[in-house]
Amino acid sequence: MDLLLPCCSWVEQLVQKKAEALKYLRQQAEREWREIHDGTLRFDRIKQDIAALRELSKPDLLSFYQEHILSADSRRRSKGRTCRHTRCASEPETAESRDSQSDAPAPSTSSRDLNKEFSKFTRSTASTFAPRASGPSKNPAFKGSTLYTVFEVQAWLSLAVGGLLSYNIIWPTDKPSIARLLGMWSIWMLTVPSLRARDCDANEKDALNVLFILLPIINVALPFAWKNFGFIFTADCVALGAVYAWKGCLPKFGESSGA
């Protein structure tokens, strides 16, 4: 309980931190857009939070601690003891089971940790340089909605038109042109952002975040090997399919047909 004595100083430090002016205009824009995206529309959230903090008292903290921390911790301990007791009663441990558990290979966590860190990096990078990714709630472009269909049609239509431009089928020209350049970049500029704007699952979000970082690298690096718009567009399509397959987002036609 001695940790709660400097309550006032902690509150003032938190108030000062919340009242700090933002360094970049982008941070303010992201904050305002988050209110619009979530539907809360509390554009004066900082002022409301500061006012609520100044009304906070030590009894409030004690009540919260006793109600949500102590009680929850005791429930977890009680539940854990019950589960262990039930398991020991129903499945008595034998020497054979102990040997099999000791011989079982330990799960490799390095690959999972690496994949987790990579997904975290791509998500933060894509969220910084791209529009806000689709969230699990309050996204108007949910599956089955008209907006969801619009984004999907826009994504695949831009991919098709980009391919026609890259391969010099639409507005053909003997020289490099802006139209062919836009076609080469169409997957990164239009297809991936349109797919990211929908309400999609976590695996597809990770795939689109990876593509948002991978495609510019491909489009900048491949011209050193072969300066061909169609070749680079095809490489982007291969990367799109490969990343979707890696994240398990490709449709399983065999299962659907068998069903």
Image (cartoon, rainbow, N blue to C red):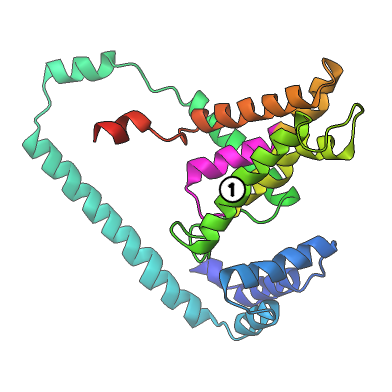
Q: What residue is at 72 percent from the left and 63 percent from the top?
A: 30
| 79, 7: nearer the viewer | 79
Number of on-image labels: 1
| Dot 1 amino acid type | Leu
User: Along the horizontal axis of the image, is 119 left or right of 1?
Assistant: right
Tell me, yes or no, whether the highlighted magenta stretch contains residue 101: no
**Image quarter of residue 44:** bottom right
Q: What residue is at 19 percent from the left and 19 percent from the top?
A: 98
Crowd rating for badge 1 (residues with CA inside 10 Å; few <14, some 14–19, many 20+): many
> Up-down: is 103 above or below 23?
above
Position of the C terminus, as image quadrant, is: top left
| 96, 38: nearer the viewer | 38
The span picked out in magenta is 198-214
Provide residue 39's location: percent of width, then percent of height. Answer: 57, 74
Which residue position holds label 1? 195
Q: Secondary structure at mark 1?
A: helix
Provide residue 47's location: percent of width, then percent of height. Answer: 70, 82
Tell me, yes or no, whether the highlighted magenta stretch contains residue 207: yes
**Image quarter of residue 35:** bottom right
| 140, 129: nearer the viewer | 140
Q: What secondary structure predominates along the stretch shown in magenta?
A: helix
Provide residue 72's location: percent of width, then percent of height. Answer: 33, 62
Provide residue 61's location: percent of width, then percent of height. Answer: 49, 75
User: Along the horizontal axis of the image, is 149 left or right of 171?
Assistant: left
